[in-house]
Amino acid sequence: MKLAIHHRPNSFSDRWIAYCEENNISYKLVNCYKNDIIQQVNECNALLWHHHHGDFKDVITAKKILFSLEHAGIKVFPDFKTSWHFDDKVAQKYLLEAIAAPLVPSFVFYDKQEALDWAEKTCYPKVFKLKGGAGSANVKLIRSRSQCFKLIHKAFGKGFRQFDSWEHLKEVYSKYKSKKASFKNVLGGIYRIVVSKEFAHQMPREKGYVYFQEFIPNNDSDIRIIVIGNKAFALKRMVRKDDFRASGSGRIIYEKNQIDERCVQIAFETNNKINAQSIAYDFVFDEKKQPLIVEISYGFSVAAYDQCEGYWDNELNWFEGKFNPQEWMIEEVLR
Ligand SMILES: Nc1ncnc2c1ncn2[C@@H]1O[C@H](COP(=O)(O)OP(=O)(O)O)[C@@H](O)[C@H]1O
Ligand SMILES: [Mg+2]
């Protein structure tokens, strides 16, 4: 067995490479951006690539390359069932509805008039989301009909940028105030207003659809459960001050007793239906305290989970102690 690994510093691949070195697993570094990537992988049995939604090259190449190889019988990470819906909340709505997973009630429209008619009759608040993005960047609370109408006009007009530099600056500034970002980060945010990110120009504007979710009130946090094979680990993320959004807040709680194990159970059940190698499931709780899935993602930050106290197996037995999720990914590929 020989693995091909596309290396990106500070991604899963750092640990994949270390694991191969330590365990004498044969591997080769490949460059997925080169024309001959399929030939590069030729003598290998598998390709692993931690592609990122914020890297434009990854966005336009990764799924095509990974799924082509998978089509031809090569093992890949992430595979089709794990990642066809990655960074696409609308795709996740269809998938989670299709497998009858407990998704927050979600609404998508591709017709402006239909969206306006819905907005006229529905109750508020609602949550507006772009299909892509992370760290709560493209998630907004809609408090009124007129605010909703405005968004619908924009969605079917000039559309939205994937990266909003003003929102980014606001986020960095509020993190600076709560000592979670440095002054240099604030300067970086100001710089981004003047010189926008290359990614912001490359990504097409989001338009021609509009996506909402029912607002699930009174959540001071969300719960993220990550399932890899038959193991799962979790953390709780507190919402930002005076905000309903937890993802990206940096306010993380790792204690096991803070995690509602019903979420672990649902994540295993849902992952079995999706048949995925590795997925993070984000939950909030409705007024009857029932867990609901907000979104799913194969990708997650590398270091944030090192402080977890342990993990569960798929029978919800708890194993205390340190672990390395990236090694489990390789085990999934070698299985
Ligand atoms: N429908 C909802 N009701 C209440 N809170 C929500 C809802 N959707 C998302 N949130 C909150 O907003 C955060 C960001 O939303 P999410 O869809 O996970 O976007 P991102 O991909 O940016 O993480 C979540 O972590 C959760 O705290
Ligand atoms: Mg999220």
Image (cartoon, rainbow, N blue to C red):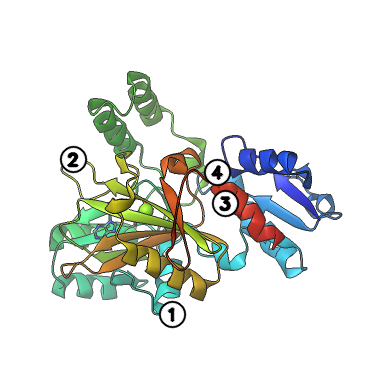
What's the CA distance linking mark 2 and mark 1?
A: 35 Å
What's the CA distance linking mark 3 and mark 4?
A: 6 Å
Q: Name which residue type carries label 1.
A: Ala
What's the CA distance linking mark 3 and mark 1?
A: 25 Å
Q: Earlier in the sequence, mark 2 or mark 1?
A: 1
Query: Is residue 229 visible from the viewing direction of this image?
Result: yes
> What residue is disc 2 on?
241
**x, y percentage for residue 159?**
36, 55
**x, y percentage for residue 278?**
54, 59
Query: Is residue 159 visible from the viewing direction of this image?
Result: no
The quadrant of the picture occupied by the N terminus is bottom right
* Front label number (3 vs 1): 1
Residue shown at 44% from the left, 71% from the top: 270
Above or below 326: residue 175: above
Asked where in the image residue 276 lies, by quadrant, the reply is bottom right
> What residue is disc 4 on?
55
Residue shown at 61% from the left, 66% from the top: 80
Neighbours of disc 1 within 10 Å: few (<14), some (14-19), many (20+): few
**x, y percentage for residue 97?**
39, 77
What's the CA distance linking mark 4 and mark 2?
A: 29 Å
How many labels, in total?
4
> What residue is disc 1 on?
98
* Front label number (4 vs 1): 1
